[in-house]
């Protein structure tokens, strides 16, 4: 019974995690229930949400965790650790650079101030998690975040085929400088 309550508590926290969403999309039926357009409101709501996450890990709740089976308790505490942005927990819970990158964006740096920070975070995740030579995906992501259009076209032309290239230029033009 206690195990079920903990699972439901963590699930509720996952479902109510605050998210940023453009104000133009807030009225749509595809919006998240806890979506905010204002950075100030998002930050305030996120701080409250993180406090709810922390409350699950307080020493007063240890007896509840102790009543759960080992793997359930460890897994749920790991999920809460990731939601709180614990870097060590993110590193041990993710299997690749893309998972680590997204986890950092969602739980550690949900509001990155600039493009350079995004690029640095991606490079850090690739460096820490990539166990092989970089593939087209890593090369393409880095070229995009480096604003290196020529490199994007070069990497794409080597591997992604003519259809992609035909549509790449109009897509890049639509984005603008």
Image (cartoon, rainbow, N blue to C red):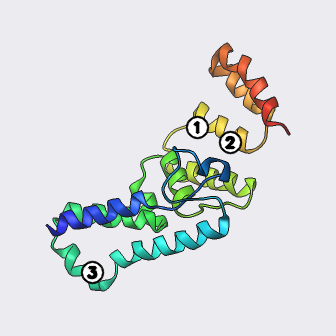
Residue at (51%, 39%) from the top-left corner?
A: 132
Q: Using the image as rendered, state which of residue 157 and residue 167 is in the foreground.
A: 167
Circle 1 sits on which residue? 134
- Is residue 54 shown above or below 171? below
Asked whether, in this view, residue 166 is left or right of residue 34, the answer is right
Circle 2 sits on which residue? 142
Foreground mark, 3 or 2? 3
Cα distance in 3D space between marks 2 and 1: 10 Å
Judged from this view, the residue extending furthest toward the top is 162
Judged from this view, the residue extending furthest toward the right is 177
Residue at (59%, 49%) from the top-left corner?
A: 27
Q: Quadrant of the C terminus?
A: top right
Cα distance in 3D space between marks 1 and 3: 44 Å
Judged from this view, the residue extending furthest toward the bottom is 60
What percent of the width, then of the height, locates residue 142?
A: 68, 42
Asked whether, in this view, residue 172 is left or right of residue 141, the answer is right
What percent of the width, then of the height, locates residue 34?
A: 50, 60
Q: Which sits earlier in the primary sequence, circle 2 or circle 1?
A: 1
What percent of the width, then of the height, locates residue 64?
A: 21, 76
Q: Quadrant of the N terminus?
A: bottom left
Disc 1 on helix, strand or loop?
loop
Circle 3 sits on which residue? 61
Asked whether, in this view, residue 28 is left or right of residue 55, the answer is right
- Is residue 128 shown above or below 55? above
Residue 4 lies in quadrant:
bottom left
Foreground mark, 2 or 1? 2
Disc 2 on helix, strand or loop?
helix
Check disc 1: other Cα within 10 Å, few if <14, some if 14-19, many if 20+. Answer: few
Q: Are marks 3 and 2 in contact (CB under 8 Å)?
A: no
Disc 3 on helix, strand or loop?
helix
What percent of the width, then of the height, locates residue 42?
A: 59, 66
Q: Using the image as rendered, state which of residue 169 and residue 28 is in the foreground.
A: 28
């Amino acid at each position: 019974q206690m195990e079920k309550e903990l699972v439901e508590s963590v699930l509720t926290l996952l479902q109510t995690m605050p998210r940023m969403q453009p104000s133009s999309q807030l009225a749509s039926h595809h919006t998240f229930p806890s979506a905010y357009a204002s950075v100030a409101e998002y930050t305030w709501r996120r701080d409250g949400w993180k406090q709810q996450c922390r409350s699950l890990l307080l020493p007063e709740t240890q007896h509840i965790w102790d009543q759960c089976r080992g793997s359930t308790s460890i897994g749920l505490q790991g999920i809460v650790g990731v939601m709180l942005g614990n870097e060590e927990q993110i590193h041990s819970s993710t299997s690749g650079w893309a998972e680590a990158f997204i986890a950092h964006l969602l739980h550690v740096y949900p509001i990155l101030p600039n493009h350079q920070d995004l690029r640095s975070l991606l490079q850090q995740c690739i460096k820490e998690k990539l166990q092989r030579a970089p593939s087209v995906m890593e090369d393409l992501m880095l070229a995009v975040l480096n604003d290196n259009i020529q490199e994007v076209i070069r990497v794409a032309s080597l591997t992604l085929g003519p259809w992609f290239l035909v549509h790449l230029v109009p897509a890049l033009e639509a984005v603008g400088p």
